[in-house]
Each structure stands twice: as C-alpha cells, then as structure tokens.
Amino acid sequence: MFYREVGQFKSSYAADQAIFPIAQDRWFVIGVLLIAFLVVPFFVTDYTLNAVYLPFLIFGLASLGLNILTGYCGQLSFGTGAFMGVGAYSAFKLTTAMPELNLIIVFLAAGLITAVVGMLFGLPSLRIKGFYLAVATLAAQFFLVWLFYKWDWLRNYSATGQITVPPRRFFGVLMTGQAAAPAAKYVLTLAMVAFLALGAKNLVRGRYGRSWMAIRDMDVAAELIGIRPLIAKLSAFGVSSFYVGVAGAMMFVVWLGAAEGGDTFGIQNSFLVLFMIIIGGLGTILGSFLGAAFLVLMPIALKTVMVDALGLSAVFAKHLEYVLMGLLIIFFLILEPHGLARLWQIAKEKLRLWPFPY
C-alpha cells in the first residue's frame, strides 16, 4: 500500500510520458538528490568522499556507458578501460593546452573525442557480433594501452610515463590536486553524473533507445522493419564511449589526479565495469549504479571485516574478493539474470500489496 498507482491519473501526453510517472518515484529521486547534494558534502568525512563516493559515481557513469552498448544494444565490449583512458588523456591534453578552459567543457570535449574513437573501433560490429566482436574490442583495449605508452606526445613528453593534472579551478574553487576539497570535487562529479544519467534515461526511451533494443533482440527483424544497423550500432558505440570517456576524464582530473597507461586503464577496469552491469542488471539505468555501489563497497567491507576485525592478511582478503566476485556473477547469471535492478523491481511490486499477501 506504500507504493501504489491508484488515483494517479494522467490528463496529457506529457504527463503520461514523464520519466517518473508515479509520484512515489519522483519524491524518492528528489529526496535522494537532496540528501546527496545538501547532506553528504557537509556530514561525510573527506576519506569517505574520496574512497567511496567519488569512485562510486565515476564507475557508475562508466557502467552506464557500457550498459547502453551491451545492455540496450547487445554489443559486447571489453575495451571500457582503454576508452576511459582516451577520455583521461584527452582531458590532460585539453587542460595543459588551454589552461583557462572550463572543466565542464573539458569533460564534455574529452567525451566527444572518446566517442569518435569508440565509433572507429565499433565499425567491426557491422560485420561481426557476439564473441568475435568482444575479441575485436579486446584488441582495441590492448592497442590503446600500447598507444598510451608509446606516443610521447600524449604525455607531453614526460620522462616518467605518467600524466598529472595541473591545478585548475571551477568558478574560483580549486578542483584538482591534493589541496582541493573533497566535498567540492564530489559536488562537481555528482552534478555531472546526475545530468548525464537523466540524459541517458531520456535517450533510451526515445527513437534511438528503441532502435538499440530492436537490434539487441533480433537484428535481422529490426532491419526488415526499417531500422538501419549502421546508424543504430555506431550511435550506440558513440554514446557509450562518450559516457565512458567523461567517466575517465573525471577519474583522472577529479579523483586520481595522476595516471599511467595500462596501470590505471588496463584490462582489469574493463572487466570490473562489465561485472558491475552484470550484477546490477543489463538494460537498466538503475542497475548500472547498483552494480557500481556493490563492487565499490564490497572491497571496503571485506577489508573492514577480515583485516581490521579478524586480523587476517590484506593479500588473503584481496584474493577472497576475487573469489566472491566470481561466485556472485555465477549466482546472478543463474538465479537472477536481471541483477539487483530486478530485485528492486520485485520489492516495489511487493510494496504495492503490503500488508496483504496478494
């Protein structure tokens, strides 16, 4: 009875097509955003913001990008880590070449550059799909990481092979470097992620989102009803790479402050983001953030319980983390293929009837 649609009538097309047509959903999202913007920056410690909230938001955005490609369009990709690297290196070149450029423009421009690169590596999807496409994107991952190491211009000819973000301000507030306040970096990241997530929610409900889902379900039938696979697949690669590139740029500029090729943007990040959307739920916006929250919090929880409380070694806790991650992926693939987002949907269905059993 807490979550019900009875009495919520729609009298216009705009109201019927709203992103959150049910009042409880609207108030819940507004409440979460108010807490995130007005409570978290003032009452959460700097360590928690840096260790939990920033990686959650950044990996949530990267997962959202991969979910657009894999969950909505059905194109499997193992190159997410490298595309995040493209966004990071693009942001580095932009911030060093144009010091006065606004950080929002830097993030969006880095995303656009990554979108172009993603569409180039998405061209094989016009001929191959499934496992063969995954291998092609894996080749893109290794090629781009190799490029990060070998092309000295990308690093401004740094002898160490590392890129470091210079001090930059956003409307007078320092946003980069060790002296930057974690609360300021968190608010900027949260605003970007909330805006892009809202855009993705609108996008997947429109013409492009429907064409992606048609290609995912049956590409031959989609082509027969007039959907052009060229436009649908390349647009999915472009939009997905844009989101991943923005996440990589924010990861470098706002969170880490420094990066080094394959160490930061290696294959491990590609698999981590893929695991996030599998556990969170393929083909859902919410699932991207649920999976990111789960896999960001799980290592911290394991460290707290096993290392701090039980006194076990950190190496053993790290190995156990890999084991649990594999078991959870098997569990969700077998018992709940739609992930945590489906469990949330089931909970809302139960709340429609509570306290009655049926």
Image: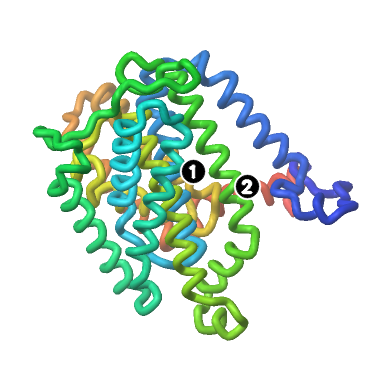
In the rendered view, tell whether residue 139 sits above or below residue 188.
below
Q: x%, y% of residue 8?
A: 85, 47
Q: Is residue 324 visible?
A: no
Q: x%, y% of residue 322?
A: 25, 46
In the rendered view, tell whether residue 93 sits above or below residue 44.
below
Between discs 1 and 2, the one toward the N terminus: 1
Give the left or right position of residue 346, taking residue 183 as reference.
Answer: right
- The quadrant holding residue 238 is bottom left
Q: x%, y% of residue 233?
A: 46, 69
Quadrant where the C terminus is found in the figure: bottom right
Q: Is residue 315 visible?
A: yes
Q: x%, y% of residue 207?
A: 63, 65
Front in this rendered view, residue 77 or 307: 77
Quadrant where the N terminus is found in the figure: top right
Gap between marks 1 and 2 measured at Cα: 17 Å
Element under label 2?
Answer: helix
Front in this rendered view, residue 334 or 357: 334
Q: Amino acid at mark 1?
A: Phe
Seen at 48% across and 34% down, the residue is 104
Residue linked to disc 1: 289
Residue linked to disc 2: 347
Residue farthest along the left direction in this orientation: 159
